[in-house]
Amino acid sequence: MFDNDKMKLLYKRMVVTRQLEYGIREQHKAGKVRGPVHMCVGQEATGVGACACLNDDDWVTSTHRGHAHFVGKGLDLNKMVAEMMGKSTGYCGGKASHMLIASREKGMLGGCGIVCGALGIGVGYGLTFKMDGSDRVALSFLGDGASNEGMFHEALNMAALWKTNNVIFVEHNMYGLTVRADRHLSVENISDRAAAYGIPGVSIDGNDIIAVIEATEEAVARARRGEGPTLIEAKTYRVLGFSTGDKGGYQSQEEIDSWTTPEKDPIIRFAKYLQEKGICTEADIEELNAEAQNDVDKAIQFGLESPYPDSSVLMEGIFA
Amino acid sequence: MSKRFYKDVLREALIEEMERDSNVFLLGEDIEVYGGAFRVTEKLNEMFGSMRVMDTPISEQAQTGIAIGAAIAGKRPVLEMMYMDWIGLTLDQMVNQASLLHYVYDGQVKLPFVMRTQGGARASASAQHSKSLEAWFCHIPGIKVVSPSTPYDAKGLLKAAIRDDNPVLFIEHKLLYGTRGEVPEEEYILPIGKADIKREGSDCTVIATSAMVLEALEAAEELEKEGISIEVVDPRTLVPFDKETVKESIEKTNHAVIVHEAWKTGGFGGEIAAIIAEEMFDSLDAPVIRLGAKDCPIPYSPGLEPLTVPNKDDIIAAVKKSLQ
Ligand SMILES: Cc1ncc(C[n+]2csc(CCOP(=O)(O)OP(=O)(O)O)c2C)c(N)n1
Ligand SMILES: [Mg+2]
């Protein structure tokens, strides 16, 4: 595992992610962030934990629900928020939106609004790393719903066949948009699908960041050795519904409550772990919480104060 | 007559056709329990059960194949494709199967299959949720393409599409769901392939599609104050295209402006302009003007997105240029 400083950093990143979601939700209500925004409250352990096992030159493909991935990969919070507000200081100059954030420098390439749309691209990265004799790794995040796309099956087959440097990380949050997993999946565990491609598949508790890190470290090590891809399925839960546009009515309150208990909440669990291991005191946790909130507040302020892009950039950058 | 929402009358059309014909069934993402991303199928599962209102996994290619197969086997499926942006995932099935099987099997099969989708920008939905891709389908013989701009047209044409024995791409618009218009209480059906004059005028014909019809009507109001009278023609269906109505209008006005939300390059406006040039050249007093989205991916930023799609001011300027 990691040294104490990194463990504390991961905790802070989880809290940043959560507070960011609440902050962004407020900004969306105020009309400063627009379009449907997909939040990952309750899913902080997967994005932050899995990305912690990667270096800056390992590349990640994300999804429409990527905020924990972006924070986990160490992206600058100010530039993230500015992009979510469509400002010129954002990661993509305001052209992308919250869904499509990318940072080549940080190995985040990138967010994607098309379900499973980035998986083939991720395998393309992994294939390139292998061709170049590099031990760099590409990790692709997906949702449970995405595992029903043709792309999932086509890409896994090729990644397995060519033993590319990939990790396929499914965040199984129990719903594909509004459809509960037992109504869209033919199997209970998506990891079972790995057998069809002859690669390892594991199911883990996605709300336990330690389990996430252990499984990802093993998969990344395997990919670095050139032994091919691993399918990780992390069971977790999407607490705030599909997006800011969600009218609800399909997730029962009882179900939501059962996933937000202290025994299930990934942040509370990690705080407890850090204290039990003597890595943090209660005061340390309080301090990290305050720092995280402060970072988020500053980022939102930065976003609000930044200008919109100049109209002259509209027709720039269509071709390289 | 009463004023009703576009989304509500689409739902009514589905109900009426499902009640009339037990072979009509709906499938698509989030249409069953949730009632559709744009609420068109709300509570239809309670009325018709989950065998006729089916949530599907996120598997667009196979959904399309399954709808085509069911159509050939005797059902009349209506498949909802939530955003037009990922209609590319259905494209092979549409282009290599749906469009041509009736023809190449020499009439042994029919494909009474409707794909409902919606397109359009100006909702800050960013580059993968804002496109207008109808031209792709207009290019393929064997697929009808319908694109209603008003609640009245939406209801009458959806009913016609469901009764049609051919694959029909039925294109709604995300900004139109919340618009209201007069719709009769009694049942009616509109013919596929017939344009509609949304406003009569004498100086210039503006051929507008989908949400751009609303912009054209606003432009007409403003131009009228300046003494310029424009006729707004809404083709309503792009394939088959009602040349006759366009011809009659241009014979009267001698000027033509075409406006759609799709990108200008390769957009269906080019086809309309070509038809006018080939068949109505003698009626023209000025070159045809086309307006379409700027040829760039649709950016998210509120500072940029509004600049991409034509609006009423662009239409006013184009009409004035044509009349110069
Ligand atoms: C190809 C495609 N189909 C459908 C959609 C609409 N859509 C966006 S997210 C989503 C659900 C994805 O479910 P899952 O992969 O489980 O991710 P989650 O939202 O649960 O994180 C759907 C259907 C889309 N964006 N792209
Ligand atoms: Mg999911």
Image: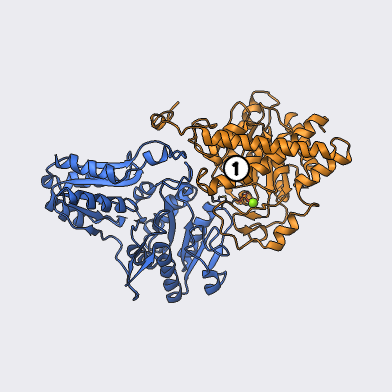
Q: The residue under label 1 is which amino acid type? A: Thr
Q: Observer-nearest residue: A64 or B300? A: B300
Q: Quadrant of the N terminus of chain A?
A: top right
Q: Which chain is blue?
A: B
User: Is A179 displayed left or right of B42 in the figure?
Assistant: right
Residue A198 appearing in the image = no
Residue at the image position 39 percent from the left and 32 percent from the top: A311
Q: Is mark 1 within 8 Å of ligand 1?
A: yes
Query: Which quadrant of the structure image shows residue A49?
Result: top right
From the image, tell me which residue sits under label 1.
A63
Q: Which chain is orange?
A: A
Judging depth in this view, the residue of A163 and B284 nearest the camera is B284
Task: Give the percent coordinates (x, y) of residue B73.
Answer: 48, 66
Nearest the viewer among A290 and B93 is A290
Q: Residue at x 45, y 32 (%)?
A: A309
Left or right: residue A7 compared with residue A111 = right
